[in-house]
């Protein structure tokens, strides 16, 4: 395990080893030497800031970046004060890219005041050739750019950046391996996400993810379970298993294993109290998974099941490989089998060729399934995806439809949340309430939030809470 590796015992005057992760520890040691020099000269440690701009997978990657920076001797800080800033980018919708361009402009101002500052970009956006070209042309003050497949080499790239005069760029088209046992710094002490797979093989026609995250690769179950046990021994009680499509977990392993089987094994980990997972593709959700969830006392009563569209015609154009009726039938079956489960979803409005009648179909699914929550997105054209070449829908029209969809999902979410009123439920306390320090915020198994009187001492604990007042998407309660 990495905890056993002592950086100070690594001789950085020797050549770097070729095997991983040893090679990266060598470069961490080398970077640490550099931060020591910085400290001697400046009388303080260098400061670093990791900005996460994407999904839970990105957030997990950011923890890896932070872990390596910590080993290299950096102190965490805000962006404005940092000597090293790294943006872990997202590119699923174009507004994510626009945000990066905007923030880079501001960051350049900081760099002018602190010329020793270094700026790095990594994550999904850098894997996109057109975005990479734009960054290189218009933002020459960026010092390091790398992608999603070589993030395990961050220590080595950080060192290369300090050794180099120009921008260091290292983007790989695909992953060569999964490197285990690198350090990481967790955001929360009591809950954690862990990757069970990388990439995606689905090729939904609107989605850039398969282009930037590559083909699907599953981690070995032994590695996953070992990491989970390690987390539990450090005090983690809730673990979220992460993948673009967790329901196809294990298909590419030498000894194939289903996601449901992995969950069964995870259930057996002593001391682990809650298991969550994200994201499920409806076409791959098995009977076995429903059975495992039904019989489990640890798997949370929440399923995120992206619908994308309620129109079979649009679903086909999206290459989702299920029909409207198949989706509704699946969702209602899950509701029947596991009555207290919350089903949440993603919906895209304005996919090429969408008509009023298609939007009506989506509204019909929302009414029938009654989602507990939904993320609604305006379709965003992504260069390099098949949908980008299809006939686009006028923006003004999309706006009208979007508002209708949003209003209806808010209605069903409120209706669903109300069903819990008066119940006593277990909440995992996550933080002291930002607006009212006499209250804490906890998360229920079904993902609803509840605010109730309490203090810092409760953070990370599972407590019984009575759900008194429903405020749409959250509850006010008291300890039962
Ligand atoms: N435009 C809008 N939304 C998108 N999503 C993925 N690609 C696009 C796109 N091009 C949404 C999907 C997915 C979620 C993570 O982002 O709903 O489930
Ligand atoms: Fe995109 Fe589909 Fe993969 Fe989800 S499953 S990331 S929507 S390609």
Image (spheres, grey):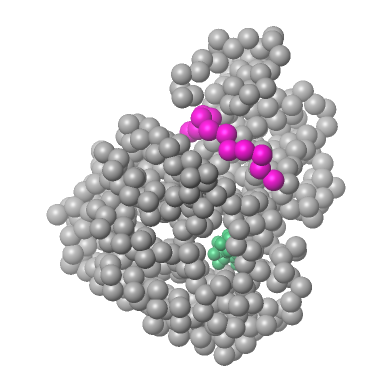
Percent from the top left, x then y, of residue 44? 58, 19
Toward the right, the furthest residue is 137
Q: Residue at x 38, y 45 (%)?
A: 239
- 159 versus 463 height, above or below: above
Q: Nearer the viewer, residue 295 or 171?
A: 295
Q: Main secondary structure of the magenta part?
A: loop
- 293 versus 77 height, above or below: below
- 347 versus 151 height, above or below: below
Percent from the top left, x then y, of residue 215? 63, 52
Q: Quadrant of the C terminus?
A: bottom left
Q: Residue at x 39, y 39 (%)?
A: 225
Percent from the top left, x then y, of residue 464? 19, 52
Residue 291 in view in this figure: yes
Picture quarter containing residue 18?
A: top right
Magenta residues, as a range?
174-187
Residue 440 in view in this figure: no
């Amino acid at each position: 395990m990495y905890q056993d590796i002592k950086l100070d015992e690594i001789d950085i005057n020797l050549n770097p080893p070729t095997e991983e992760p040893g090679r990266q520890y060598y470069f961490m040691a080398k970077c640490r030497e550099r931060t020591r020099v910085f400290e001697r000269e400046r009388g303080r440690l260098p400061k670093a800031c990791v900005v996460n701009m994407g999904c839970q997978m990105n957030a997990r990657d950011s923890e890896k970046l932070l872990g390596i920076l910590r080993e290299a001797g950096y102190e965490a800080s805000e962006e404005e004060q940092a000597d090293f800033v790294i943006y872990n980018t997202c590119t699923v919708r174009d507004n994510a890219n626009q945000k990066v361009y905007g923030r880079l402009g501001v960051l350049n101002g900081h760099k002018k005041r602190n010329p020793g500052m270094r700026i790095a970009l990594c994550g999904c956006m850098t894997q996109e050739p057109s975005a990479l070209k734009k960054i290189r042309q218009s933002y020459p003050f960026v010092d390091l750019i790398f992608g999603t497949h070589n993030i395990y080499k961050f220590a080595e790239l950080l060192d290369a950046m300090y050794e180099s005069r120009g921008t260091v760029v290292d983007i790989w088209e695909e992953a060569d391996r999964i490197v285990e046992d690198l350090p990481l710094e967790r955001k929360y002490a009591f809950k954690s996400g862990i990757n069970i797979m990388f990439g995606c093989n689905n090729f939904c026609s609107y989605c850039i993810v398969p282009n930037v995250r590559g083909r699907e690769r599953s981690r070995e179950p032994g590695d996953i379970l070992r990491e989970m046990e390690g987390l539990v021994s450090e005090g983690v009680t809730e673990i979220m298993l992460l993948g673009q499509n967790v329901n196809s977990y294990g298909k590419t392993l030498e000894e194939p294993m289903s996601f449901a089987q992995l969950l069964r094994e995870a259930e057996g980990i002593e001391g682990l109290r809650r298991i969550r997972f994200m994201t499920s593709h409806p076409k791959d959700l098995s009977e076995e998974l429903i059975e495992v969830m039904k019989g489990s006392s640890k798997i949370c009563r929440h399923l995120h099941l992206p619908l994308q569209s309620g129109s079979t015609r649009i679903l086909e154009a999206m290459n989702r490989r299920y029909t409207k009726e198949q989706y509704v039938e699946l969702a209602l079956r899950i509701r029947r089998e596991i009555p207290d489960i919350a089903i949440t979803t993603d919906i895209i409005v304005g996919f090429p060729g969408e008509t009023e009648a298609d939007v009506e179909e989506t509204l019909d699914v929302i009414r029938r399934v009654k989602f507990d929550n939904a993320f609604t997105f305006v379709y965003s054209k992504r260069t390099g995806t098949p949908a980008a070449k299809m006939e686009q829908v006028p923006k003004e029209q999309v706006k009208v439809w979007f508002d209708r969809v949003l209003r209806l999902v808010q209605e069903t979410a409120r209706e669903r949340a109300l069903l819990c009123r008066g119940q006593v439920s277990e909440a995992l306390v996550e933080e002291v309430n930002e607006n009212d320090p006499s209250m804490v915020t906890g998360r229920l198994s079904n993902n609803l939030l509840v605010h109730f009187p309490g203090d810092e001492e409760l953070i990370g604990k599972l407590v019984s809470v009575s759900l008194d007042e429903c405020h749409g998407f959250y509850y006010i309660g008291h300890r039962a």
